Image: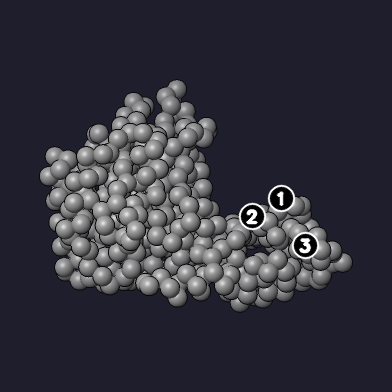
């Protein structure tokens, strides 16, 4: 596996662009396109929120019913959620505009939106944006980066990655971009993630790989406990690498799935670390668990605890908050067997042994907790299973950003 420069345009046959259509203030990039020169197999995963945005409903239908997909058009600034039949109609109108501009079927166009809930899309600006996107799209790294920037809302940085794997002596590329900073919680979050690959792979294998992956990546991150209306992950595979078609149950499938996992985990961690107002990525490992599910429940409970997150913000080794969060998680364990550790680039320190505090250095603990990536590990000594969740610290900045979001 080889990481390379780029994002959604790294794989053969993919083009992208980002433009300022006037939806956002101050000339910000606010519309993006991802386009494949050839039809793609498509897989998707979506929000578990009962309230689903119009583009989620549109994309679910395309993923389930369309023969193929070939383009994705995304706007930021307006979520097109809670907009009724009118909002869904605007998804179709957007797809029709893109269909006419590219000469592809309407049901080969996927759409995405992120931003304020309850507002209708300004279709005059959307249509103009589509025309601009089609005119300037290209296969350069810079075009992919522009697309990644255009889907940002409260994100402080673009999120993109590309890597290559060898499948049957053929080099296959997987690239991706994502956005997400707030309204982030396990079970998908206010996040959009778009993955492109030139692998030849069956639709069922592509969907299986993505569905399995989501459980251990995007569903294991949290910023603020709010599950969004717009969460969408889409994977487009155009087969232009020329490998023999990948199917389930083969060594080639496992290689591809591992590469996809690397891309999705990277993007998930980027979102968690870029939480609104955050100063640190907070990684939580639970090891020595009896079952994988037990480890996942415990790790997510720690990562989601506001008291733990504020302790991380304060660089305070207040380990009792971690034990408390484990205790109300619903998972059974013996608190008198738990070993806790904190780790960062500043070093590693054990905080408790068998549920009791050790005589550790508070100064060293503070130094460890003051880094940009902080890792907490809980060993519950019940078995060999483990799980990892990702979150961030909780600062005054989160309140400021969300109190002023619409103003």
Quarter of the image holding residue 9?
Answer: top left
Judged from the image, the secondary structure of the residue bearing numbered disc 3 is: helix
Q: Which residue is mark 3?
A: 365
In-image side of 184 versus 244 (left or right):
right
Residue that appears at 77% across and 62% down? 365
Judged from the image, the secondary structure of the residue bearing numbered disc 1 is: loop
Q: Are marks 2 and 3 in contact (CB under 8 Å)?
A: no
Judged from this view, the residue extending furthest toward the top is 169
Residue 373 - label: 2
Residue 189 vs residue 17, the one in the foreground:
17
The first of marks 2 and 1 along the sequence is: 1
Residue 194 vs residue 401, the one in the foreground:
401
In x, y percent, where is residue 145?
A: 40, 43
Quarter of the image holding residue 92?
Answer: bottom left
Q: Are marks 2 and 1 in contact (CB under 8 Å)?
A: yes
165 relative to 178, above or below: above
Residue 260 vs residue 374, the one in the foreground:
374
In x, y percent, where is residue 113?
A: 30, 59
Residue 345 - label: 1
189 relative to 163, above or below: below
- Marks 2/1: CA–CA distance: 8 Å
- Marks 2/3: CA–CA distance: 14 Å
- Marks 1/3: CA–CA distance: 12 Å
């Amino acid at each position: 596996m080889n990481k390379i420069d780029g994002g959604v345009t790294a794989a053969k046959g993919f083009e992208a662009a980002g433009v300022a259509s006037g939806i956002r203030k101050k000339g910000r990039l606010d519309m993006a396109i991802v386009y494949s020169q050839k039809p793609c197999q498509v897989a998707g995963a979506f929000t578990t929120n009962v309230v689903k945005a119009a583009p989620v409903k549109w994309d679910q239908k395309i993923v389930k019913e369309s023969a193929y997909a070939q383009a994705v058009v995304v706007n930021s600034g307006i979520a097109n959620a809670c907009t009724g039949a009118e909002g869904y109609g605007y998804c179709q109108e957007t797809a029709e505009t893109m269909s006419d501009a590219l000469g592809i079927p309407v049901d080969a166009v996927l759409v995405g939106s992120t931003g304020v809930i309850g507002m209708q899309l300004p279709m005059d600006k959307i249509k103009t944006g589509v025309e601009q996107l089609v005119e300037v799209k290209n296969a350069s790294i810079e075009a992919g980066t522009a697309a990644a920037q255009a889907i940002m809302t409260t994100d402080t940085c673009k999120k993109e990655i590309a890597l290559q794997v060898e499948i049957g002596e053929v080099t296959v590329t997987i690239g991706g971009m994502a956005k997400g900073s707030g309204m982030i919680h396990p079970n998908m979050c206010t996040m959009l993630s778009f993955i492109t690959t030139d692998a030849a792979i069956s639709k069922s294998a592509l969907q299986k790989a993505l569905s399995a992956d989501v459980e251990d990546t995007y569903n294991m991150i949290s910023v603020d406990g709010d599950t969004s209306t717009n969460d969408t992950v889409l994977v487009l595979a155009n087969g232009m690498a020329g490998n023999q078609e990948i199917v389930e149950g083969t060594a080639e499938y496992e290689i591809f799935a591992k590469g996809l996992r690397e891309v999705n985990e990277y993007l998930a961690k980027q979102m968690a670390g870029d939480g609104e107002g955050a100063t640190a990525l907070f990684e939580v490992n639970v090891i020595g668990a009896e079952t994988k599910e037990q480890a996942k429940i415990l790790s997510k409970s720690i990562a989601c605890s506001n008291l733990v997150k504020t302790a991380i913000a304060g660089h305070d080794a207040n380990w009792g908050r971690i034990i408390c969060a484990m205790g109300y998680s619903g998972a059974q364990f013996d608190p008198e067997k738990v070993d806790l550790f904190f780790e960062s680039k500043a070093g590693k320190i054990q905080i408790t042994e068998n549920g009791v505090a050790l005589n550790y250095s508070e100064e060293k603990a503070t130094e460890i907790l003051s880094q940009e990536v902080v890792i907490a590990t809980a060993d519950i000594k019940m078995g060999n299973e483990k799980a990892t969740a990702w979150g961030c610290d909780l600062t005054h900045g989160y309140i400021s950003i969300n109190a002023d979001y619409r103003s």
